[in-house]
Amino acid sequence: MPMHILWFVIMVFFVIVEIGTMNLTSIWFALGSLAAFFVALFGGSFQWQIILFVAVSGVTLAFTRPFVKRFLDVPRKATNADRVYSMVGTVTEEINNAQSTGTVKVGGKLWTARSMTGEVLKVGTYVRPQAIEGVKLIVIPISENQ
């Protein structure tokens, strides 16, 4: 098989991988393969094909990845669930892990709750959310001056 056809097949492979992932994982190698394809097409040696493949792939990777990554990285936005970590809640139904009971009100919403420390928390106790497990809020008691 002529080398220019092999480079074309390699380039098509990298393009298919890129289309399949849409994650900028192989587009640089597709461009390197394209460069090697042209060198092979015009009779360049195998050494020059490899050198050009590595050079073009490396240069395009080095110069475009940071630029493109900046536009593809979407800043993470806090969800409603994430916001409860900075809030203080109030126990509205006694939290008892052994009996699987407990509800807290945080940010105007009621959550099923469990105590992180395992202690029973009475109605009216102020709590701070520490984790979310499924639909349960895991809380710790806080004193009134915290």
Image (spheres, helix red, strand yellow):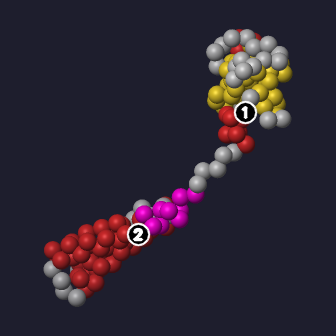
Q: Which amino acid, by three-letter code, is at mark 2?
A: Thr
Q: Which amino acid, by three-letter code, is at mark 1?
A: Met
Name the residue at 74% across, 29% down: 88
Tell me which numbered mark, 1 or 2, is placed earlier along the sequence. Answer: 2
**Mark 1 neighbour class, 10 Å CA radius: few under 14, some 14 to 19, many 20 or more:** few
Please provide percent x and percent y for residue 8. Answer: 33, 77
Is there any visible trace of residue 86 in the rendered image? yes
Name the residue at 68% across, 35% down: 86
Please provide percent x and percent y for residue 106. Answer: 78, 31
Q: Quadrant of residue 87?
A: top right
Badge 1 element: loop
For the image, the number of numbered tags is 2
Q: Quadrant of the N terminus?
A: bottom left
Q: Quadrant of the C terminus?
A: top right
Q: Is residue 110 left or right of residue 118?
A: right
Please provide percent x and percent y for residue 55. Answer: 26, 71
**Mark 2 neighbour class, 10 Å CA radius: few under 14, some 14 to 19, many 20 or more:** few
Q: Which residue reaches farthest front? A: 145
Badge 2 element: helix
Q: Which mark is residue 30?
A: none
Name the residue at 75% across, 19% down: 144
Name the residue at 71% across, 14% down: 97
Q: Which residue reaches farthest bottom? A: 42
Magenta segment includes 115: no
54 versus 43 height, above or below: above
96 versus 46 height, above or below: above
Labels 1, 2: front one: 1
Q: Is residue 59 left or right of residue 111?
A: left
Q: Which mark is residue 64?
A: 2
Is there any visible trace of residue 94 in the rendered image? no
Query: Which residue was labeled with disc 1?
Result: 87
- Magenta residues, as a range? 66-74
